[in-house]
Image (cartoon, rainbow, N blue to C red):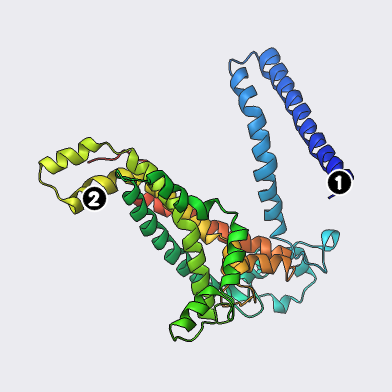
Amino acid sequence: MTFEVITSSLGQVGSTVLFILVGTILLEILIYLIMGKVLKSRYTLPAMLLGPGIVGLAALIVYPLLWELNLSFTNMSLRRFGDKAEYTWLVCQAADPAAINSWLFDCLLKNYADVFRLPVLKQVYFFPVFFRTILWTFINLVFHLLGGLGLAMLLNRPMRGRALYRTLLILPWAIPQVIAVLAWRGEFNFEYGFPNIMLTQIGLEPVKWLTDPTWNFIAMCMVNIWLGIPFMMVILLGGLQSISREYYEAAEIDGAGGWGQFRNITLPLLQPVMTPAIILGTIWTFNNFNVPFFINQFELETSDILVTALFRAAFQYNRYGFSAAFAFVIFIILLLYSIFYIHVTGTLKEVKL
């Protein structure tokens, strides 16, 4: 890195910050003139406070989503990039009518239909990858929840060195994820990896962690479980510490045992904290890219989950229109799951003992 590169980078960052600052000031002046001077609205101040945030969300979230939605209806690829791309229903107009069975699925929603009827990778179709992603999410979430809850309950009691234990347990979460995953991948080396050395020392055969489909999936789960437990532990520990000791003292007076206190006090009062954590954990695990991508060093299609398959479809096979539709399918799946889970668990409602 040279001095010119540093000054150039600082100049680009500075100009961007200046552009945002000037834009915000102009926006505030515009809102003030329209709502305060022209319309005489009493909501001028709230509008001025919310205005920059709304514009920022529209620019960073709404516009990219609309652009990707538009892309999902085109046949854009590396060969038909930019102006060469066409909407799929326009392509149908030049196609043989005998080859079109349904205008809806063969023309208008062609990319969305192709997600389910064509391989999303070279050989693998959508549903095997989808079911593998569900299995991957379920295994990881169960271990995250059980491991995090167990450690949180251990740390939520008086003990020596509790701060040290918390620091050590949070360490996997604090390490940059890519660095941690690459370190783990080195440990899964067939000849020099620590697990295989240990297996060999006790007389067992070494495992093909990176080349065997089953063991590669297990290796992915092991790494992600190791990475995810600290987050769940921190969230649940905060929830446990918010529960008053008076509930447990009253339960002890009534003769409730440890399991009864856990079932009737801890779990209900922990639910408002646990439910958002589970939803976040599900979405993050479902969309986890770093662990499956880097552990799957040899690009085994039998180890890919939806988000890594989406990445390969977009940036290795250059199917941009198809990938945009693929991304929206994943988005809809997660949206439906979140709505269903919130509805079933009744999260954020008042807890009743």
Frontmost of labels 2 and 1 is: 1
Marks 2 and 1, Cα distance to the nearest angstrom? 58 Å
Residue 118 location in percent, x, y?
Answer: 63, 76
Which circle's residue, 2 or 1, is located before the other in the chain?
Answer: 1
As drawn, is 195 to the left or to the right of 67?
Answer: left
Q: Name the residue under label 2.
A: 262
Q: Which image quadrant for residue 320?
A: bottom right
Position above or below: 282 against 246: below
Residue type highlighted by circle 1: Val
The residue depicted at 60 percent of the width and 65 percent of the height is 183
The numbered mark at residue 5 is: 1
Q: State the residue in front, 63 or 132.
A: 132
Q: What element carries label 2?
A: helix
Q: State the residue in front, 156 or 286.
A: 156
The residue depicted at 56 percent of the width and 69 percent of the height is 305
Q: Is residue 338 in view?
A: no
Residue type highlighted by circle 2: Phe
The residue depicted at 62 percent of the width and 18 percent of the height is 44
Q: Is mark 1 on a helix, strand or loop?
A: helix
The residue depicted at 69 percent of the width and 75 percent of the height is 100
**Residue that extends furthest to the right in the rendered view of this protein:** 4
